[in-house]
Amino acid sequence: MTRNLMLLLSAGGSAALLAGAFLFQALGYPPCAMCLWQRWPHAAAIVIGLIALKIPGRFMPALGVLAAATTAGLGVFHTGVERGFWEGPSTCTGSGTLNGLSGADLLAVTGPRVVMCDQVSWELFTLSMASWNAIASFGLMIGWIIAVRLSAGSTATGSSRTV
């Protein structure tokens, strides 16, 4: 396994998850605010991966670990909000208000559908999209960590060590 392969797999995994999120949105599952938060670290991971392919060393893959850990953490937090383990942001949960409107009022507004962060709009095997994002992102985190370790053997010319 080479550093560049791990970079491609890790950044590509984020690209696949981001593409999946946009596909679900196109299929009629609009994202809530917390869903959108989880997309940004994936976008960052894609850019980090592309840069890391050109720049040797551990710094960029370490940033990839941070991006994957961030979206995984957001996914765990979002899952907890959905399951009622803890409260989420008051602006995107059913109990919150926005400019005097409750979550129920916002859902009744005509126009684009508003999705509350504490409501599960789709699930597979009792796990929501936020849960699946967290699981996949922890896997991507492992890929980034492997890339960091393989970067320890890279030379200044960018050659990749194999395992």
Image (tube, rainbow, N blue to C red):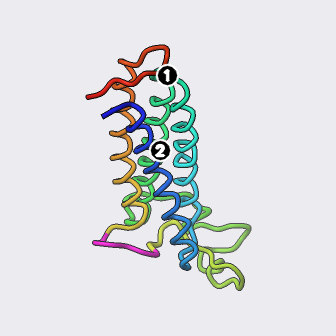
Earlier residue among tags 2 and 1: 2
User: Where is residue 135, by image quadrant?
Assistant: bottom left
For the point 54% across and 46% down, which residue is it? 41
Please state the horizontal and vertical placement of residue 40, each as a whole percent of the image: 58, 49
Please state the horizontal and vertical placement of residue 82, each as a whole percent of the image: 42, 66
Label 2 neighbour load within 10 Å: few <14, some 14-19, many 20+: many
* Three-letter amino acid code at the position of disc 1: Pro
Is residue 143 located in the magenta-colored stretch of the structure?
no
Please state the horizontal and vertical placement of residue 102, each as a whole percent of the image: 63, 74
Q: CA distance from mark 2 to mark 1?
A: 16 Å
* Residue carrying label 2: 11
* Three-letter amino acid code at the position of disc 2: Ala
Residue 29's disc is none
Q: How many marks?
A: 2
Q: Nearer the viewer, residue 116 or 48?
A: 48
Please state the horizontal and vertical placement of residue 59, each as a whole percent of the image: 49, 23
Label 1 neighbour load within 10 Å: few <14, some 14-19, many 20+: many
User: Where is residue 106, by image quadrant?
Assistant: bottom right
Is residue 122 located in the magenta-colored stretch of the structure?
yes
For the point 58% across and 75% down, which residue is it? 26
Q: Main secondary structure of the magenta part?
A: loop
Where disc 2 sits, the SS reads helix
Query: Which segment is the magenta one?
Result: 121-126
Q: Nearer the viewer, residue 86 or 145?
A: 145
Residue 56's disc is 1
Where disc 1 sits, the SS reads loop
For the point 40% across and 45% down, which residue is it? 9
For the point 43% across and 21% down, which residue is it? 159
